[in-house]
Image (spheres, rainbow, N blue to C red):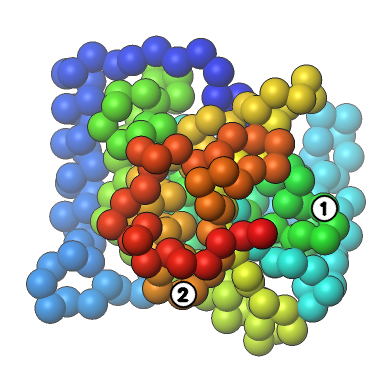
Amino acid sequence: MPDFGAQTRPTVEEVEACDEDRCKADDLEDPAKPGAPPPAYPRINLEAKAATVKDDSGKVKRTRYPAVDLSRRIVLIGLHQAGVERGEGRWLQTAHRVTCHRAIGPSGNRYRVHPLDRRLTCTNRLDRDPYHCVGIEVLANLEGVEGDGNWYKPASFGYGRFGAAQQAALRQEIAAICEEVAGEHGGVVVGIAPHRVVGVGKNGKPNRQICCGSAIWSRGGEWAGAELGLRVPGPEWSKGGLPIPREWHGEYWPRCDRRLA
Ligand SMILES: [Zn+2]
C-alpha cells in the first residue's frame, strides 16, 4: 500500500473523464435499480497464486506468516483502498500481490487473496495480539473525503469514484467474512475499522490519512456497523493512527451504536 503523502489535484476535465468511465462500468451492473436486488458478485480464488509471491530478497513472502487461531483472537475487519486505479482486467492479473485477505475490484469481483486465519502485516497494531485483522483492499484510488478532490498522486495512479457495483460487492464480502469466521474458524468478527486509525510509519507518525477514505468507510464500514451490528471506532478512537474525522460519517452513522473499546 502506498504512503499517502504529498498529493496533487487533477483538473476538472480529468475528473469528468474519469467519472464518465466509472458511470459506464456501473451501468453494466447497477444494483441500485428499483426492485432489483444486487447480484451476487463473483468470487475469484487467488490464494494459490498469492502464496508464490516473492519479496525483494527473492524469498516467498506470504507463507512466512503463520495461521492463527481465530477463536482466541479479537477478530476485526480492516478497510483499505489500494490508492491505485486500474481496470478489472489489470486487477485480475495483479490482485494476488495485495497484502490483504480479500480485495474488491471495480466491477465487483471479490478476490480471495489469503486465507482468513493468515496473519498479514496490513493493519498495523490490529495485526497483533490480542487482535487479528482481516484486511479488505478496495481496488480503487478514492478521495480522502468524497468530493474534495484529494486523491493519492492521481497523475501517477489514476483516480476514481466508489461505484455501485464495488460498494455492493464490498458489503457482500463483509457479510461473507463474518459468516466464514464463525462457521469455519469458530471465531466472531466483533468490529470494523478503517486503516487510518492504526496507520503509523516507522517514525511513529500517522501515515494513512486517506485509507480507506470517506466513501468506503461510510458506505461499507458504517453500513456494517448499522446493519450487521459490528463495533466501530468512536470519535476519539485510534491506536497509533488518527481518529475518524467527522466528514467521513454518512447516513448509517446514527445507527452505529456499538463502539470498539
Ligand atoms: Zn490501508
Which x, y percent locates residue 75?
A: 70, 66
Q: Nearer the viewer, residue 205 or 84?
A: 205
As drawn, 228 above or below 98: below
Secondary structure at badge 1 equals loop
Residue 20 in the image: state x and y as whole percent.
16, 36
Which residue is outermost to the left?
Answer: 34
Q: Position of residue 245 (x, y in %)?
A: 45, 38
Whether residue 94 can be seen here: no
Assign the N terminus to one quadrant of the image.
top right
Q: Considering only vertical position in the picture, is 65 above or below 31?
A: above
* Figure quadrant of residue 39: bottom left
Locate the C terminus and report the quarter of the image it occupies.
bottom right
Residue visible at 83% across and 74% down in the picture: 72
Label 2: which residue? 228
Mark identifier at residue 115: none
Q: Amino acid at mark 1?
A: Arg
Question: Do the CB atoms of the residues marked 1 and 2 lie less than 8 Å apart?
Answer: no
